[in-house]
Amino acid sequence: MPIYEYWCDSCRRIVSSYRQRFSVPPPPCPRCGSSELKRIFSTFSVQKTYSELYEDILSDHELTHGMMRNDPRALAEWNKRMSGGEKPSTEYEEMTERMEMGEWPVAQLEEKKQEFFGQGKSSSESG
């Protein structure tokens, strides 16, 4: 279902609402209850399928060669394309920025590995 946006003159706010189709009358304002909402133009996005994303990435020969050479810049670019424009967490963004500069953020990756697997030694190290 699409999300439509409306302007409420009473409380002077933008209201978003899931609507099954455009011809359905606007809902009452969830803030003030006014039924006088005016539909406004809003942006929208179209998501690519994973198949289309992979096809796009694999057709980029420079990117695929970079991935095969284990270039951190190529992995950062691949990551950016796969995220679909979503904003990453701050720590992930820091790692990606380092990769875009050609560095592998080894210390950060090791720290995350320790957080995930616990502070003790892994079974392969204790053996």
Image (tube, rainbow, N blue to C red):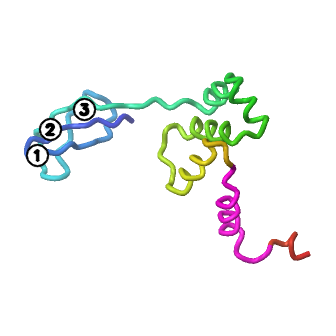
Q: Residues within 10 Å of mark 1 (few under 14, many from 20)?
A: some
Is 96 placed left or right of 16 in the picture?
right
Residue positioned 33% across, 37% down in the render: 3
The stretch of residues the image draws in magenta is 104-121
Indicate the secondary structure of the residue bearing disc 3.
loop
The residue under label 3 is 24
Could you say which is closer to the camera, residue 83 or residue 109?
Answer: 109
* Residue 53 quadrant: top right
Q: Residue at x 9, y 41 (%)?
A: 9
Nearer to us in this view, 76 or 18: 76
Outermost residue on the right side: it is: 127
Q: Is residue 102 magenta?
A: no
Specify the quadrant of the image occupied by residue 64. Answer: top right
Q: Main secondary structure of the magenta part?
A: helix
Quick check: marks 1 and 2 in contact, CB under 8 Å? yes
Name the quadrant of the N terminus: top left
Name the element at disc 2.
strand
What residue would you read off at disc 1? 34
Is 63 left, or right, of 39 in this rendering? right
**Pick the front one: 93 or 43:** 93
Give whichever of discs 3 and 2 has the lower sequence position. Answer: 3
Residue 103 location, x and y as percent? 67, 47
Is residue 120 within the magenta segment? yes
Which residue corresponds to the image point at 60% horizontal and 52% vertical from the top-left?
A: 95
Q: Name the residue carrying label 2.
A: 37
Who's the residue at 67% across and 66% down the image? 116
Q: Amino acid at mark 3?
A: Val
Q: Label 3 to label 1, Cα distance in Å?
A: 17 Å
Question: Badge 3, how many Cα within 10 Å: few under 14, some, many 20+?
Answer: few
Please, is residue 107 above or below residue 74 in the view? below
Residue type at numbered disc 2: Leu
